[in-house]
Image: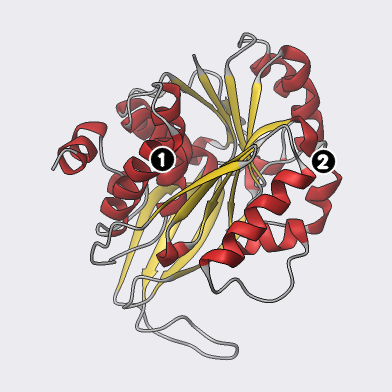
Amino acid sequence: MRFLVLGSINLDLTFKVDHIVERGETESSSSLTVNAGGKGANQAAALAKAGADVSFAGKLGPDGKWVLKTLSSFDADTSLSIVDEDTRTGEAIIQVDKGGENCILLFAGGNKEFKEGEIDSIISSFSPGDVIVMQNEINLLDHAFKKAYERGLKIVFNPSPFVPSLLDLPLEKVSLFFVNEVEAKAMTGYPGDAKSDDDFVKMGKKLLELYPDGEVVLTAGKKGAYHFFGSSYCYSPIVDYPVLDTTGAGDTFTGYFLKARSSGLDPKTALDISSIASGLAVSRPGAMGAMPFWSEVMEVFGK
């Protein structure tokens, strides 16, 4: 099984701050780092570090070529990515506070400049049964869904960042959703905030009612993660590491879960492994560089 991540690639400008800047406020940062990022590139990095056969297809400017080199260093195939000399690579301005929480401001750049023919060419390189992973940080998602489904690819979708127009996509074609509490609430119209296990279970089951042919992984932050399929579900608590930087934690979880399931592991085991991986990631600075390799995760898992 091969994985195709069709998604965003960004230059992450990360500012360490005492607290997240509020309206009208100016604050000095204690440091600035520039890292490789973008939800698509991050998920491809996680898959590659977990040992999956993964190709990343993004669109970027020449200023982002070094990000492709970073992905290649993890053994991700980047040959399908498009470097456009007339555009700029997407950028993210990230504030990380002293508690490790973050907020992100995005500039799309090449991520929103895909052409239909480019997407067709990328998808044609894959075969029925392969897996395509997408997020909401590129344009022409509707076209990509259609072409991937026609090609017989399994569609994995992370509707992040969520906007109401995503509900107009042919989501019935999705094989596996990765959602957090905010996305699940928006997709289901769940009333109020999710505060208990019962709330999260109801949300997950409601998503399956809406999309009965798919599976759902619902991440609930410090409350853990759930997997729903058919009439069953399972749960895994977080692995509690000291939090340094939460950037890329969800992408790490996604990549590791996909790798674990493609290796034949059951959903509960895949959740447990993914929780370890994301826990290790948040205990380190950055996104791609913070993601652990499979051997590191297995060392913890085996204890």
Going by the image, does 103 lie left or right of 139? left
Q: Are marks 2 and 1 in contact (CB under 8 Å)?
A: no
Disc ID at residue 169: 2
State the residue at coordinates (23%, 66%). Answer: 242
Q: Is residue 149 above or below residue 68?
A: above
Q: Seen from this angle, which residue lies furthest bottom?
A: 24
State the residue at coordinates (45%, 69%). Answer: 102
x%, y% of residue 94? Answer: 46, 65
| The one of 222 and 199 positioned closer to us in this rendering | 199
Q: Is residue 229 above or below residue 115?
A: below
Tell me the SS state at disc 1. helix
The amino acid marked with disc number 1 is Lys
What residue did someone put label 1 on? 268
x%, y% of residue 226? Answer: 50, 50
Gap in angstroms between the C-alphas marked 2 and 1: 29 Å
State the residue at coordinates (69%, 63%). Answer: 185
Mark positioned earlier in the residue sequence (2 or 1): 2
Classify residue 142 by image quadrant: top right
x%, y% of residue 37? Answer: 45, 47
Disc ID at residue 40: none
Tell me the SS state at disc 2. loop
| The one of 233 and 162 positioned closer to us in this rendering | 233
Q: Quadrant of the C terminus?
A: top left
Is residue 129 visible in this depiction of the protein? yes
